[in-house]
């Protein structure tokens, strides 16, 4: 398809959106305005620009529907105390001596079963602080353990970013989740090593004030807590295992409903679904904005120009997948927005270059976890606040987080090269 917008227009629109996001303007509006300005500059045609923005937003609707229904699972796991119970059980079983390992694995599993990464960190934080205080660990160390564990779990989860990437490439959600299983393990190992080193430092030790946060005091049994997530995993696994397709639109809310039933909280199901909706509505609106600018970028000459640049540098086409994930997530400070823009924009180019769609989805998804926690995004502040870190202390963790994300990205890319 012939490009309808110039590369310079698309890039200027994206840069404007980034500047506004950094200036703390609402991200969805930033992306919409960036798309509008970029489209006008790139085509000098207002009608074409608006139509392309609407078309781009419309392409997000299938992902948004699945994300909205995933809120039922997330709300149930959080409000019934299931997420906290799973985390506590893992930490208790592994013990103080393996505190960093326990904290990282607990956060990874909570995120992997469908709780958003920022909520996963916030959920585990009170438990991590308590065990960290007993073991004499530092706050930066335990926060890195949680963030790294969350990053590892995020690329094998039915979370918004995974749904958006699988939709963009037309791939089964379970297949995209499982494709990054080895990169997840690699990221977890690096997390444990780096967090273990940081946790032993004397700076940032846990104080009594840090332990004032309280969790849910009426927690279900571990067996009841884990049933909901297991139901989701089984339902999603039916397609590759038995050829029976259960869409995430059904599997995710079913898991949430079962979670409320087995934890004997059915009478609160309306409250829990409203809470879950409040947690996903923000990312759903963000995806609408993301779709508008992705539509402009996708219809621009950027894909052709980037491909030509890679050819001039004698770089293979598949490098575009992880590279686009890294750059777009860094630009938006969001795994979901970055992975979505990268996948929506470069899927046609990657597929036409012969890159397998499942591998491309995995590489983009892993790449989106490298620099997704920059200060112009909410994740940076939410996670820092969970353990009472100052902005300057939180900033010091960014290189370590990037190294964890880079580990999974390199692993995903190497797997493609070896398999190819």
Image (cartoon, rainbow, N blue to C red):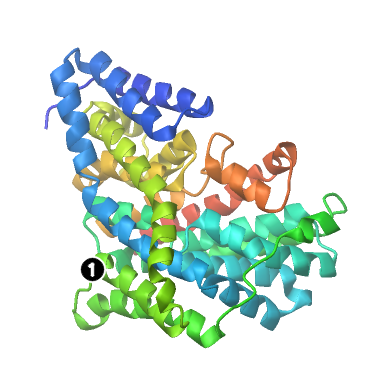
The residue drawn where x is 26% and y is 81% is 241
Query: Can you say which quadrant of the picture contains the C terminus?
Result: bottom left
Q: Nearer the viewer, residue 223 or 195?
A: 223
Can see residue 362? no
The residue drawn where x is 68% and y is 55% is 143
The residue drawn where x is 61% and y is 42% is 381
Query: Can you say which quadrant of the picture contains the N terminus?
Result: top left
Q: Which of 232 and 365 is in front in this view?
A: 232
Instruction: Give the residue pinned by disc 1.
Output: 247
- Pick out the residue farthest to the front: 267
Q: Position of residue 270 (x, y in %)?
A: 38, 66
Q: Is residue 174 above or below residue 398?
A: below
Q: Is residue 167 above or below residue 390?
A: below
Q: In this view, does 311 lie above or below 326?
A: above
Image-based side of 132 in relation to 365, left or right = right
Q: Position of residue 111 (x, y in %)?
A: 50, 64
| Residue neighbourhood size for the residue with mark 1, other residues' Cα within 10 Å, grouped as few (<14), some (14–19), many (≥20) | some
């Amino acid at each position: 398809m012939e490009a309808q917008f110039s590369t310079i227009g698309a890039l200027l629109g994206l840069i404007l959106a980034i500047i506004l996001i950094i200036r703390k303007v609402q991200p969805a509006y930033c992306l919409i305005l960036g798309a509008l300005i970029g489209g006008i500059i790139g085509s000098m045609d207002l009608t074409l620009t608006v139509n392309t923005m609407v078309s781009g937003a419309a392409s997000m609707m299938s992902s948004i529907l699945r994300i909205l229904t995933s809120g039922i699972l997330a709300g149930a796991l959080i409000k019934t105390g299931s997420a906290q119970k799973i985390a506590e059980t893992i930490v208790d079983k592994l013990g103080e001596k393996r505190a960093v390992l326990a904290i990282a694995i607990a956060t990874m599993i909570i995120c992997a079963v469908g709780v958003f990464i920022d909520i996963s960190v916030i959920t585990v934080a009170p438990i991590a602080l308590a065990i960290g205080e007993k073991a004499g660990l530092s706050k930066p160390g335990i926060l890195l353990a949680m963030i790294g564990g969350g990053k590892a779990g995020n690329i094998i989860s039915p979370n918004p970013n995974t749904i958006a990437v699988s939709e963009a490439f037309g791939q089964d959600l379970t297949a995209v989740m499982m494709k990054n299983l080895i990169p997840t393990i690699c990221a977890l190992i690096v997390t444990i090593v780096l967090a273990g080193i940081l946790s032993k430092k004397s700076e940032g030790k846990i104080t009594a004030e840090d332990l004032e946060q309280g969790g849910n005091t009426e927690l279900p049994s571990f067996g009841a807590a884990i049933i909901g997530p297991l139901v989701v995993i089984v339902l999603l696994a039916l397609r590759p295992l038995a050829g029976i397709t259960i869409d995430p639109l059904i599997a995710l809310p079913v898991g949430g409903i079962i979670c409320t039933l087995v934890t004997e909280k059915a009478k609160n199901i309306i409250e829990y679904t409203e809470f879950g909706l409040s947690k996903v509505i923000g990312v759903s609106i963000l995806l609408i904005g993301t779709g508008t600018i992705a539509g402009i970028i996708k219809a621009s000459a950027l894909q052709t120009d980037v491909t030509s640049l890679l050819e001039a540098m004698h770089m293979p086409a598949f490098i575009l997948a992880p590279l686009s994930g890294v750059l777009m997530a860094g630009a938006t400070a969001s795994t979901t927005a970055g992975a979505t823009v990268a996948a929506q924009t470069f899927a046609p180019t990657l597929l036409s270059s012969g890159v397998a769609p499942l591998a491309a989805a995995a590489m983009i998804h892993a790449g989106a976890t490298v620099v997704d926690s920059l200060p112009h995004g909410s994740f940076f502040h939410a996670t820092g606040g969970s353990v009472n870190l100052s902005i300057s202390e939180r900033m010091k963790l960014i290189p370590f987080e990037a190294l964890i994300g880079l580990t999974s990205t390199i692993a995903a890319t190497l797997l493609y090269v070896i398999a190819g």
